[in-house]
Amino acid sequence: MASGRTAAPDRGGRGRAAEVARGLAAYGLIVRMWVRSTLAYRTSFVMMAVGNFAANGLDFVAIMLMFSQIKALGGFTLPEVAFLYGTSGIALGLADLLLGSIEGLGRRIRDGTLDTLLLRPVPVFAQIAADRFALRRAGRITQALLVLGWALPRIEVDWTVGRVLMVPLMAVCGTAIFAAVFTAGAAFQFWAQDAAEVQNSFTYGGNALLQYPPTVFAKELVRGVTYLVPLAFVNWLPALRLLGHPDPLGLPGWVDFLGPVVAALMCTGAGLAWRLGLRGYRSTGS
């Protein structure tokens, strides 16, 4: 079975680039197939997308109810918390839309259906990531965008070109960081086979954490989210810089701008973990 793996590393930069291009093309084709299938039942799709939108909206409703009783949470006003909520939700929503299906890898390993993907002349990662592409997940992104759009004109920020560019940069880096966590969690399932909930604790659980100011959490937790699984670079650290709040860990100011570096390192590490896990896969024997 090992000889049929298309994910084995190619020799040379050109071979690697060709593999990536082939994977992106295959990903696009599979996604289009699932989108066409989804839109064939438009009423069902609209209902599921609205349901996804509403279910995620309840989280922000809870925050608004909280602020009906208080003026600030950990020194952050409602628009500032809404800014954290929106930036985190957009990053997770995009990563979930693009790669969320990869969390089903453990099921494929257990039932043996992963073996069929290994026989196809397409990178396995692209097939897994695009499998059952759920367009309804765009509801989360739409809801987070609306909250962010509400927050931006209400937060007290002296907007410059650099500060304006920080917002889309946060979304891009945050998406990459969450995508790396999705990928690393999926790679772990090559050994654990039933670790989807562990992965979810870092993705969906991490998003729930990042919706609130770091100042309301114990410093030990903030350190863990900064140094161990650096989700703080999704929005906490750049938001502290943008909103003018002090860093609870007292880190140097230049650390707030390391989002792109952290995202690149995490994606590289997650990619290596994926290749290692796939290389060591020995089928189910069924």
Image (tube, rainbow, N blue to C red):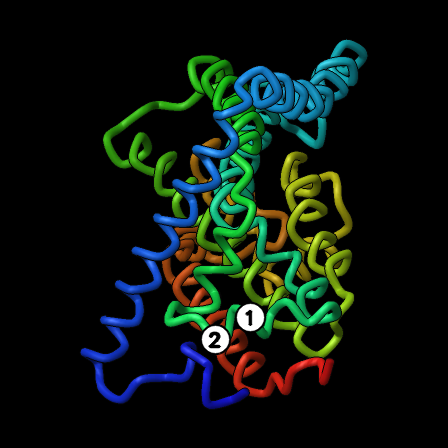
Q: Residue at image x 44%, y 60%?
A: 126
Q: Residue 86 appears in which quarter of the rendering?
A: top right
* Residue drawn 70% across the image and 32% down it: 74
Q: Position of residue 1 (x, y in %)?
A: 54, 87
Q: Position of residue 46 (x, y in %)?
A: 57, 17
Which residue is situated farthest in the left direction here? 14
Check contact, mark 1 vs mark 2: CB within 8 A.
yes
Q: Which one is nearer the viewer's eye here, 215 or 39? A: 39
Image position of 142 (left or right of 200): left
The residue depicted at 71 percent of the width and 27 percent of the height is 73
Residue tagged 2:
119
Please state if 191 lies on the left or on the right of 259 as rendered.
Answer: right
Identify the disc placed on residue 116: 1
Vertical comparison of 139 with 222: above or below: above
User: For the residue marked with disc 1, what is the amino acid?
Assistant: Thr
For mark 2, does the 10 Å Cα neighbourhood hold few (<14), some (14 to 19), or many (20 or more) residues? some
